[in-house]
Every structure is written in structure tokens, then in C-alpha cells.
Image (tube, rainbow, N blue to C red):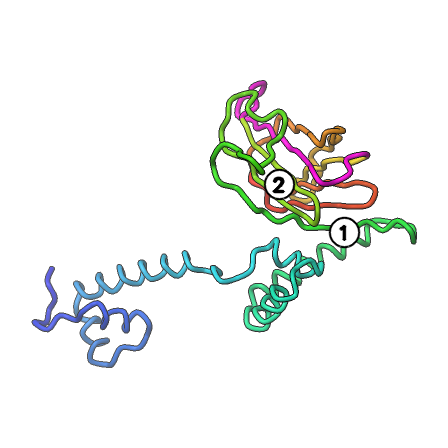
């Protein structure tokens, strides 16, 4: 169906209508023209998709907000995040939630005056598909059942954690999480996997820094590596 007017509005005029900035004549035209209403609706959907794709692109990552809270950022980057927080209610709310979470976690742990545990939030530094190369450690077990995606590499202070998800050959539709910890004393180190508020499993980290967690249902987990003096959190871990 064509436009009811010989002077059909262009896309710029229709976008002004979508944004609520159109004049009364254009509003009256669109009210009586089905063709232009359909065009305006399509432009509105496109604009919404573009806005959703750009949502919070300029915001610090969750890991960076965690490091800001823990004082682990460089002075320049910490200052930039502080400036961003004065302007962004989303990051301010997310930081408050993180502070509350870490506060509740600390209140549940009992420390002696000489044995305080450092709580670190690991930051993802590499997570693309590909074969691990030089400088990109992979779990010792990786590749045993056929390679899928390259490892996810995290760092927290001096520690590096490489994680790889594979299909569990022994259980259909289940996943296997392979891990390697370097740069950290692995004696008495354990890996705890949480799903929501429930701890799913705890496994030891061996003397070489390797650990394996099998039989996992695909989902988003939190991995906590805990030892006598440090606790490292890997949040929003996508298994599968």
C-alpha cells in the first residue's frame, strides 16, 4: 500500500517521529497513513536492536569492577573507573552488589589475626577459539578426547588459570571442565564449583596445578579456587 500523500516522509522524518520529536503535521500524517506507520514501526524495531547491541559497551567489565573494589587496578585505570561510576547508574549498582556479595562472603569466614585470606576476582584475558600457543598454558588433560575450543585464560594477581570445556565421553550431554593453575602455591588448593547458591562439587588441585570436574550439566557456574592464604573467584563461567 503506498503512502497516502505524494510527499512521502523520508527515514529521517520517521526517526524523528519514533523519537517523539515530530511536528504535528507529521504526526497527523502517520496517524492516517498505514504505509508510513509500518515504516515507522520497522525503524523503531531496528533502532531498538541497535541500542540493545550497544548497551553498556563503554562500561568496565564485571571483572574490572571487582578489581577496582579490591584496589588491584593501576592508578590511571582506577581513576578512569571512578569517573565512570559518577556517571553510570548501572555500574554503580553492579559495584554495590559486588561489594555486598564480598562482604557477605567475608562475614561467613573466620580468620585468625595472622591468617587473613586474600579474596581475588579473576579477569578473563583470552577466550577465543583456537589451539593454545606459546605463552598460553593449557590443562595437561586437554586434547585427550579431541579438541573443541581453546582454553579460557584468567589472571588474578600473580596467578594464571587456564580452563577448557569438553564433552564428557563417559556421560552423554554432560561436560568436562579441565583446569590448570600456575603462579600459585597449589598445596592444599581446592576447586569449588557453584551453581547459583549451591556448591556442586569440590575437587583437589594436584601438585602440578591440574584439576578435573566431570559430569557437568551445561550452564553458567562460579568457580572458586581456595587455599590457606588466597581465594580466587571466576564468575559467570559458561560451561557448554
Farthest-out residue, left: 6
- The residue that mark 1 highlights is 105
Q: Is label 1 in contact with label 2 (beta carbons under 8 Å)?
A: no
Point 61% across, 60% down: residue? 94
- The residue that mark 2 highlights is 221
Horizontal relation, residue 88 to residue 13: left or right: right
Magenta run includes residue 46? no
How far across and down, in percent of the image, does residue 17 sit?
27, 72
Using the image as rendered, state which of residue 119 and residue 202 is in the foreground.
119
How far across and down, in percent of the image, does residue 29 sit?
18, 74
**Residue 170 figure quarter:** top right
Point 16% across, 68% down: residue? 33
- Magenta stretch bounds: 167-187
How far across and down, in percent of the image, does residue 214 sit?
63, 26
For the residues labelled 1 and 2, the Cα–Cα distance comes to: 17 Å
Farthest-out residue, bottom: 24
For mark 2, give the secondary structure: strand
Horizontal relation, residue 48 to residue 210: left or right: left
Amino acid at each position: 500500500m503506498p503512502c497516502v500523500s505524494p510527499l512521502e516522509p523520508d527515514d529521517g522524518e520517521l526517526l524523528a517521529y519514533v523519537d517523539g520529536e515530530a511536528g504535528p503535521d507529521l504526526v497527523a500524517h502517520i496517524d492516517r497513513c498505514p504505509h508510513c506507520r509500518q515504516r515507522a514501526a520497522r525503524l523503531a524495531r531496528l533502532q531498538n536492536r541497535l541500542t540493545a547491541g550497544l548497551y553498556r559497551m563503554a562500561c568496565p567489565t564485571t571483572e574490572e569492577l571487582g578489581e577496582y573494589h579490591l584496589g588491584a587496578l593501576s592508578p590511571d585505570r582506577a581513576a578512569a573507573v571512578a569517573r565512570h561510576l559518577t556517571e553510570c547508574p548501572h555500574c554503580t549498582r553492579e559495584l554495590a552488589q559486588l561489594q555486598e556479595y564480598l562482604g557477605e562472603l567475608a562475614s561467613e569466614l573466620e580468620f585468625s589475626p595472622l591468617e587473613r585470606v586474600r579474596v581475588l576476582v579473576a579477569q578473563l584475558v583470552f577466550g577465543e577459539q583456537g589451539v593454545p600457543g606459546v605463552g598460553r598454558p593449557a590443562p595437561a588433560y586437554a586434547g585427550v578426547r579431541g579438541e573443541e575450543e581453546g582454553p579460557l585464560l584468567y589472571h588474578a594477581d600473580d596467578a594464571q588459570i587456564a580452563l577448557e570445556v569438553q564433552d564428557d565421553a563417559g556421560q552423554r550431554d554432560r561436560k568436562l571442565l579441565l583446569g590448570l593453575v600456575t603462579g600459585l602455591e597449589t598445596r592444599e588448593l581446592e576447586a569449588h564449583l557453584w551453581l547459583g547458591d549451591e556448591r556442586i562439587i569440590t575437587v583437589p588441585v594436584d601438585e602440578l596445578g591440574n584439576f578435573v570436574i566431570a559430569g557437568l550439566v551445561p550452564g553458567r557456574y562460579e568457580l572458586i579456587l581456595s587455599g590457606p592464604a588466597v581465594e580466587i573467584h571466576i564468575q559467570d563461567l559458561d560451561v557448554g
